[in-house]
Image: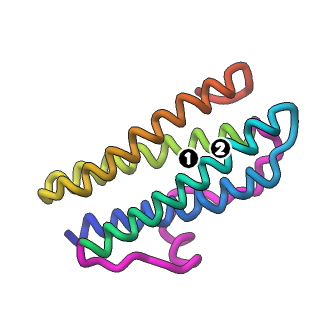
Amino acid sequence: MSKVTDRLNIHLADWNLLYTKLHHYHWYVTGPNFLALHAKFEELYDYAGTSLDEVAERILALGGKPISTLKQYLDQTMLTEAGKEKTAEDMLESVIKDFRTVVDSLKETGEMADEAGDSVTTDMLNGHIEELQKQIWMLTATAKGLPVKA
């Protein structure tokens, strides 16, 4: 199970980074889509907050130790911090890219959990994959016509 909890800690780091990054976008988004994106980024950081707690509690339930410092999150995340994105389009592109990265990683962890006979973790990860794929679709539809790789 330690391989699974190690991978879950990477997801914990990713969710924590997304939580902060989505707050950044929520505060700094501007332009004609401000109202919709401001609300959407808040919805997404709320989801990231719920997800990071769920992952940490699953790690604990498996007898592991969830990472819990900013340094650990930055050391283990597969994502990059916000700051370079200046436009709403940049922010959307970044979120779509991050969500795709997380989905791919969640699928790999799900396969590991399956091999370990941990269907509960697999179910949790599949729920996250389902939600992120829905959000990718919605964000891509929002960005249609913008310079975003959909």
Expressed as whole percent of the image width and height from the top left, the position of residue 12 reads 45, 65
Q: Does the magenta stretch include residue 72?
A: yes
Q: Is residue 5 magenta?
A: no
Quadrant (top left, top right, bottom left, bottom right) of the N terminus: bottom left
Q: What stretch is highlighted in magenta?
A: 62-89
Vertically, is 32 above or below 19?
A: above
In this figure, which residue is indicated by the disc labeled 2?
A: 94
Left or right of 59? Residue 24 is right
In this figure, which residue is indicated by the disc labeled 1?
A: 98
Q: What element carries label 2?
A: helix
Vertically, is 140 above or below 48?
A: above
Residue 46, quarter of picture: bottom right
Residue 91, quarter of picture: top right
Expressed as whole percent of the image width and height from the top left, the position of residue 14 reads 51, 60
Vertically, is 77 above or below 142?
A: below
Q: Nearer the viewer, residue 107 or 49?
A: 49
Left or right of 67? Residue 139 is right
> Mark 2–mark 1 contact, CB under 8 Å?
yes
Quadrant (top left, top right, bottom left, bottom right) of the C terminus: top right
The dominant secondary structure in magenta is: loop
Expressed as whole percent of the image width and height from the top left, the position of residue 83 reads 76, 57
How many residues crowd mark 1 within 10 Å: few (<14), some (14–19), many (20+)?
some
